[in-house]
Image: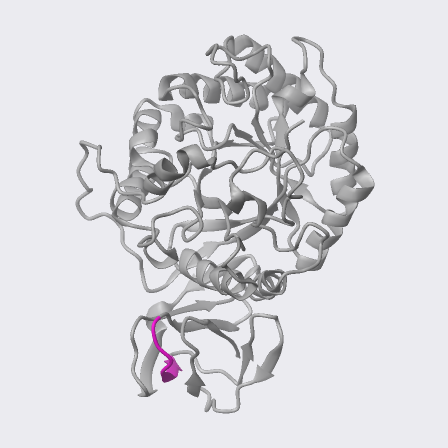
């Protein structure tokens, strides 16, 4: 069986690169007047998950090693696939024995689950092109029955928090149907979940990018009532054109179209990036991956609307496995195939230690950055305030190596600088409000915690 992992085949690489730009070149809509922009101080709930897919029948003892890595990271939520093809191989014949063992194993490790339901069973597709896994259901009653039976079988497990309805449905490779077919698939899936497990959330399938044109007919036709979370995915610098990077990924379509549509025309569901990552393909280093995670955490959490980040993924794919995907798909892990930790494992561990505190206040405007030596080229900073009074500062220059000082409005007693490997040292040049003599290496994020 093919492993169920992210999929960007070479044949569609060019189209994916265009899709990931996120610029709505075909939409007839206009940006909203007075669309919300990033605010200086916004307090929001934040949460984190890690992603890994498992097929029915995989060795649970081996999976437990991944769960142990999650425990080390301090991330207690897993997003993974529950495939229709695995659990209803023939119409009306459900097989949830292994799945219930998997869910219990997760519970034993303190792990909550947010599965996405996808991978259409061979008998249930309808397009006749020789594939099936990305087909819309041929019969929506079959789909309803599957979701209802699965959610009923797992309703006794409180660590199953939600069900996501398919995945990247706004990409024609992942979903060989149109938006009308997806709307009914979403509706039937939501109705089934709400009957079988009323306490579980329903999540619309994570979009390849914040796609206004795909979401508009769903929301404007009243289908926002059928889901509780609005997620999209972010892989800038792995699957994007060269000019699309972390810092400009949330573009005009996101700020002026997608967010107002969700918040004003929809039901204001929380917006998540529930899948994101950077591949250490040949020519890309562990250091680049680790630094990407620091930039991505800081940049995306500084947006006032994004409340959740999903880290893809625990480990690289076995290069000998028959997984569907291009070269990058095999190198997205925080560890190698043998679970040897990459630098990014320690970076993400450190980032969640600093930021996974329930809620964050975005306070970028409360930090004043001054270049004291050298020159700045592409200087960025983000400041977050935690409920316990601690502040977390990110500052970096993508194109130069200046020395800077940063003055914060809220005074502190001490400052600590963190390296990408998670190690820390006191920052001696701190007078209670200004961190002086911050020597920036080009492109590398400097991270500080300021104690109250």
Is residue 403 within the magenta segment? yes
Residue for point 19% across, 34% down: 29
Q: Where 25 falls versus 367 (above or below)?
A: above
Residue furthest right as drawn:
61
Residue 54 magenta-highlighted: no
Q: Position of residue 104 (x, y in %)?
A: 78, 36
Q: Quadrant of residue 343?
A: bottom right
- Picture coordinates of residue 65, whole percent (x, y): 77, 49
Can you see residue 434?
A: no
Main secondary structure found in the magenta portion: strand
Q: Quadrant of residue 382?
A: bottom left
Q: Is residue 92 left or right of residue 163?
A: right
Residue at 64 percent of width and 53 percent of height: 75
Q: Which residues are magenta?
A: 399-408
313 relative to 38 in the view: left or right: right
Give residue 132's quadrant in the image: top right
Determine whether 54 is above or below 150 in the image: below
Is 122 rendered above or below residue 165? above
């Amino acid at each position: 069986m093919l492993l169920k992992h992210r999929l960007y085949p070479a044949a569609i690489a060019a189209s994916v690169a265009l899709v990931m730009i996120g610029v709505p070149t075909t939409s007839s809509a206009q940006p909203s007047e007075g669309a919300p922009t990033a605010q200086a101080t916004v307090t929001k709930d934040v949460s984190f998950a890690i992603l890994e897919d498992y097929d029915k029948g995989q060795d649970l003892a081996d999976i437990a090693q991944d769960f142990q890595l999650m425990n080390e990271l301090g991330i207690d939520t897993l997003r993974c696939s529950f495939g229709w093809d695995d659990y209803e191989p023939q119409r009306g014949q459900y097989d949830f024995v292994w799945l219930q063992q998997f869910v219990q194993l997760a519970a034993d490790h303190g792990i909550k689950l947010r599965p996405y339901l996808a991978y259409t069973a061979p008998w249930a597709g309808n397009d006749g092109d020789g594939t099936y896994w990305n087909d819309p259901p041929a019969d929506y009653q079959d789909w309803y029955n599957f979701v209802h039976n699965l959610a009923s079988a797992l309703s006794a497990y409180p660590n199953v928090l939600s069900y996501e309805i398919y995945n990247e449905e706004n990409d024609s490779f992942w979903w060989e149907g149109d938006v009308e077919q997806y709307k009914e698939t979403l509706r039937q899936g939501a109705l089934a979940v709400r009957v079988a497990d009323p306490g579980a959330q329903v999540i619309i399938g994570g979009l390849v990018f914040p796609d206004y044109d795909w979401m508009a007919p769903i929301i404007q036709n009243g289908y926002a009532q059928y889901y509780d979370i609005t997620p999209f995915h972010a892989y800038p610098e792995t699957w994007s054109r060269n000019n699309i990077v972390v810092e400009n990924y949330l573009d005009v379509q996101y700020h002026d179209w997608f967010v107002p549509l969700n918040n004003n025309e929809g039901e204001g569901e929380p917006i998540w990036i529930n899948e994101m990552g950077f591949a250490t393909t040949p020519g890309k280093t562990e250091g680049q991956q680790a630094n990407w995670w620091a930039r991505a955490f800081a940049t995306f959490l500084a947006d006032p609307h994004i409340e959740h980040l999903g880290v893809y993924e625990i480990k690289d794919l076995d290069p000998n496995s028959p997984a569907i995907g291009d070269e990058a798909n095999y190198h997205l892990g925080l560890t190698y195939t043998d679970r040897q930790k990459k630098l990014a494992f320690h970076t993400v561990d450190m980032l969640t230690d600093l930021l996974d505190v329930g809620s964050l206040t975005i306070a970028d405007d409360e930090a004043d950055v001054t270049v004291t030596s050298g020159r700045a080229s592409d200087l960025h900073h983000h400041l977050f305030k935690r409920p316990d009074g601690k502040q977390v500062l990110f500052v970096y220059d993508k194109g130069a190596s200046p020395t800077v000082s940063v003055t914060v409005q809220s005074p502190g007693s001490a400052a600590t600088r963190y390296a990408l490997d998670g190690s820390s040292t006191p920052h001696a040049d701190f007078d209670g409000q200004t961190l002086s003599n911050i020597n920036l290496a080009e492109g590398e994020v400097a991270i500080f915690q300021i104690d109250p």
